[in-house]
Amino acid sequence: MADLKIGRLMLGIVQTNCYFVYKEGTSDVIFFDPADKGDYIYETLKEKGFNVAGILLTHGHFDHIWGTNKLRELSGAPIYAYEEEKQLCEDAVINVSEQVGRPYTVVADRYLKDGEEITIAGMTCKLIATPGHTAGSCCYYFEEDKILISGDTLFEESVGRTDLATGSMSAIVRSIKEKLFVLPDDVKVYPGHGNITEIGHEKRYNPFCQE
């Protein structure tokens, strides 16, 4: 078992969970889904002695990206996203930011493939493609520490909405059953909104994903 720790900031107009993962006793963090106020994220982490070494996106909706460009500018950290989410990240209409009155796009420094492992500051996670909330939604899995950053794919006893551009209810249920429910039951799930849960709990109680 490794020694990763995880912190959270809740930001933005829909209370998005923004997580940062780090090794105990070190200063570098991987930051997930900078929802808003990249300058606030940067300063808050800096005050705690943290340095942002990488920025990972679970998907490109406005409430998960509004802080990305400023955080990259201030920290110098590269942005990573799943290759199938490139269009949504780079289109203010499809990512809904234009409709809510604050058009915003982000171009990742690197687009990753399904199943690709990425190591940042000595921390390794794997991208798991989970289309459904959007066509390019994904999760990030730290296998040794049994941590899953699930974005808006899997919530506590719920799933992400599928009524926006590129969404699909059949796809999200299939993604959860085939890609996430095969993980160990004690994997902790850190969703984009709401409370932390576990894979085993969701297999038993998530009403969207029962046989």
Image (tube, rainbow, N blue to C red):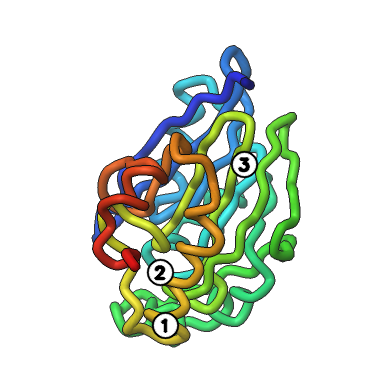
Marks 2 and 1, how far apart at CA: 18 Å
Q: Residue at x 32, y 55 (%)?
A: 155
Mark 3 or 2, nearer chain start = 2
Residue drawn at 44 percent across, 78 percent down: 95
Residue nearest the observer in this picture, 69 or 81: 81
Element type at marker 1?
Answer: loop
Which label sits in the foreground, 3 or 1?
1
Disc 3: CA contacts within 10 A as few (<14), some (14-19) or many (>=20):
some
Residue at label 3? 75
Query: In this image, 193 relative to 150: left or right?
Result: left
Q: In which quadrant will I find the N terminus?
A: top right
Residue that mark 2 sits on: 62
Q: Give the residue type that dot 3 points to.
A: Ser
> Which element type, helix, strand or loop, lies under badge 2?
helix
Front-most of 72 and 15? 15
| Residue drawn at x 62%, y 37% as measured from the top left | 143
Camera-side mark, 3 or 2: 2
Tell me which numbered mark, 3 or 1, is placed earlier along the sequence: 3
Above/below status of 6 relative to 2: below
